[in-house]
């Protein structure tokens, strides 16, 4: 049996619980992602995909149900332990790059490694290697504002992978790019994910990209269809 990297069991989430305007977003949701598997998450706008990604990535907690990453149940951890687990195990990519504007591309990939206790020289080497692999090695000294949109997103991929997470979570990672650039940048991401054998859950509205992943799951009415 293949190893499970992400396992959500019976996850439910309601915003403003108990109030008249409450919004039930997820109910009794189950999802697993196996080691090395890349799963596309497709959902209509407002269906709760960001909520699901945030719960899976330990940025938010479910009302009920459990979240396990790498076989370790993360439910019920203190905020501090959850933050540590997130830093160690999860890489995030958003639609907008969220790179730190005052730092270079390379520094943006080095900083999370230093925060994780990696020595400076090793962090530098890892950053340069990742940048080269996604084709932006020649832009390592540029600040985000001196990069194209596609280059910024490639750097954001490198940052997400910097600490060798077990799980990559991405929320519309190419949604902000024109279709041609989106495709190239998506190819670069997939190559990096495949090379590292990473498990990933990638939300996208783009069905062509979704169908290139190993499996497509659809979020509808709080469940996966
Ligand atoms: N903090 C909150 N308080 C109350 N309601 C919220 C909160 N966050 C999200 N919601 C509601 O929960 C639902 C799901 O939100 P979520 O951001 O997960 O959707 P999404 O599927 O990611 O949408 P999109 O594709 O448009 O980004 C929406 O109806 C939203 O209005």
Image (cartoon, rainbow, N blue to C red):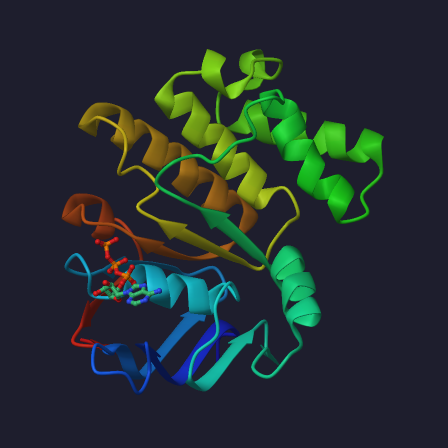
Above or below 224: residue 151:
above
In which quadrant of the rendered image does the C terminus lie? bottom left
115 relative to 71 in the view: left or right: right
Residue farthest along the front direction in this orientation: 20
Point out residue 179 in the picture as x, y percentages from the top left corner.
19, 29
Q: Position of residue 193 (x, y in %)?
A: 47, 46
Locate residue 88: give its quadrant.
Answer: bottom right
Q: Quadrant of ligand 1?
A: bottom left
Q: For the point 55% across and 13% down, which residue is it?
A: 139
Q: Position of residue 107 (x, y in %)?
A: 67, 26
Q: Front-most of 5 and 178? A: 178
**In the rendered image, the vertical position of residue 119 relative to residue 2, given as above or below:** above
Q: Is residue 94 above or below residue 52?
A: above
Q: Is residue 196 left or right of residue 80?
A: left
In the displayed structure image, the side of residue 38 where residue 98 appears, left or right: right
Q: Please state the horizontal and vertical placement of residue 56, each as a whole percent of the image.
A: 45, 68
Residue name at image x 48 percent, y 12 percent:
146
Number of numbered markers: 0
The answer to whether 210 appears left or right of 107 in the picture is left
Residue beneath the point at 55% across and 47% down: 196
Between 64 and 214, which is closer to the camera in this rendering? 64
Q: Is residue 91 above or below residue 182?
A: below
């Amino acid at each position: 049996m293949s190893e499970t990297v992400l396992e959500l069991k019976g996850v439910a989430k309601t915003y403003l619980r108990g109030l008249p305007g409450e919004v039930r977003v997820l109910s009794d949701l189950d999802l697993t992602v196996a080691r090395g598997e890349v799963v596309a998450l497709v959902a209509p706008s407002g269906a709760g995909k960001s909520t699901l990604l945030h719960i899976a990535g330990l940025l938010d907690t479910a009302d009920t149900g459990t979240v396990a990453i790498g076989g370790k149940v993360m439910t019920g951890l203190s905020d501090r332990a959850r933050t540590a687990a997130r830093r160690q195990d999860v890489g995030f990519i958003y639609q907008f790059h969220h790179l730190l504007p005052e730092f270079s591309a390379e520094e943006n990939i080095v900083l999370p490694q230093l925060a994780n206790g990696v020595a400076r020289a090793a962090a530098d080497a890892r950053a340069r290697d990742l940048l080269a692999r996604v084709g932006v090695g020649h832009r390592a000294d540029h600040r985000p504002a001196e990069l194209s949109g596609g280059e910024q997103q490639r750097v954001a991929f490198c940052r997400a992978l910097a600490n060798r997470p077990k799980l990559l979570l991405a929320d519309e990672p190419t949604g902000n790019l024109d279709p041609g650039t989106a495709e190239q940048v998506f190819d670069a991401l997939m190559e990096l994910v495949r090379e590292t054998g990473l498990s990933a859950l990638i939300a996208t509205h783009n069905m062509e990209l979704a169908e290139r992943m190993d499996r497509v799951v659809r979020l509808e009415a709080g469940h996966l269809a």
